[in-house]
Image: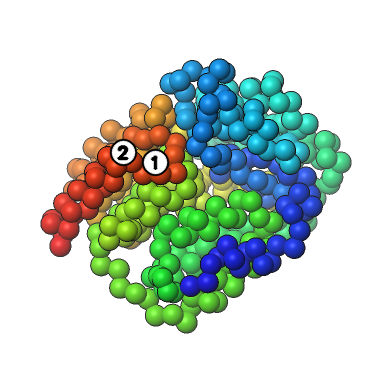
Amino acid sequence: MVSFKGILNNLKQYPLEQGGPIIGWTCTYLPLEILEAGGLQPYRIIPEPTSERADSYLDPNFCPFIRASLGKVLGGGYPSLSGIVLLNTCDGMRRLFDAWRFYCAPSFSFLLDLPRVITPSSLAYFRERLQELKEELERHFEVQITQDALVEAIEEANLTRSLIQRLLLLKGRGDPPLQEADIMDILAEGWGSPRKIFNEALQRLVKELEPHPPAPLNGPKLLVTGSLLEGSSLIRLVEELAGEVVVSDLCTGGRFLEEVPPFSNPLGALSEAYLNKPLCARMWDTQRRIANIKAEISRTGAQALIYFALKFCDPYLYEAPVLKEALQEIGIPVLFIEGEYTGKVSGGVRTRVQAFLEMLERDYG
């Protein structure tokens, strides 16, 4: 299989910063379509796992992703950014926003308020906050984000989602066979690429893979969920040990691939689609999130679940025992892993994952 990164690099004809002002973002609850409709280039903040520079600013028992993000910012790691749009997803993210503004003073900064519940009033509130973001972007960057531009941006983003969905159906094809870890790596490439170029690269990859017959994948089927992962190393470990990851319910995986439905009011459509996407642990309705995961298990035939929580990530650490109990009641084994923000898998985690897969092989054959 031709490298997707190679396909993408061949299509890029100019540095990212020449495609418009670059806006840093962190959370998939942010509708990137609003930025793209204004000719702005979103760039996802996924820093390397190092936090030494942040040690003097944040407590050692602080979220390691936040520490790594602030550490890179303090080290001048994002010189091309023209601004940032963060969400109040957790206390750590609010502290990152405060520290970023205070110590680095980006020319544009916006903290988007995200409701925790999904009700008619929260949908209306979120739509108002998106309108506020739109107006602030227009004012600061002297652009017009029109209805037509929003519609075009939504259509391009929907094309991305449909192409990723097609790739998911093509897993097992190619040489070597396409797997979930490869798709996570592909998604990561898209976070720093212009949308239209990324879509063209996806179309070329789909066209290349479609003629190949699927390779049989006979290992235990797993669903992986939890906190943000730095890279695909945990997913790739499962696949190297002959497991099959059928769903990566992660904000760095496939948590938002449903298309934004037809719309007469683009901002209203974005508000509804993003608030109703598969929930993360930060949202209030844990029972709805459990129901979503059970539905995915039923749809894919997953036999077990791996739950990864970053150290000191309170939303996921609080949710883990509730979800584990609910799944064990229906006979789904759960492996809970609490780990650091790192692109590598420790020896201890490798041993636990290997033992978990061996147990599944014994029980399900």
Residue receiving disc 2: 337
On the image, which quarter does residue 149 sit in?
bottom right
Q: Are marks 2 and 1 in contact (CB under 8 Å)?
A: yes
Along the line of sight, the residue nearer the viewer: 120 or 151: 151
* Residue sticking out furthest to the right: 142
Give the SS element for disc 1: strand
Residue receiving disc 1: 226
Give the SS element for disc 2: strand
- Horizontally, residue 55 falls left or right of residue 237, namely right
On the image, which quarter does residue 216 sit in?
bottom left
Residue found 40% across the figure and 63% down from its top? 179
Query: From this viewpoint, is residue 128 visible?
Result: no
Residue 82 point in image, percent of width and height: 76, 38
C-alpha gap between disc 2 and disc 1: 9 Å
Along the line of sight, the residue nearer the viewer: 358 or 264: 358
Q: Quadrant of the C terminus?
A: bottom left
Residue found 47% across the figure and 23% down from its top? 62
Please say if 103 is above or below 191: above
Give neighbour class at mark 1: few <14, some 14-19, many 20+ (Cα, 10 Å). Answer: many
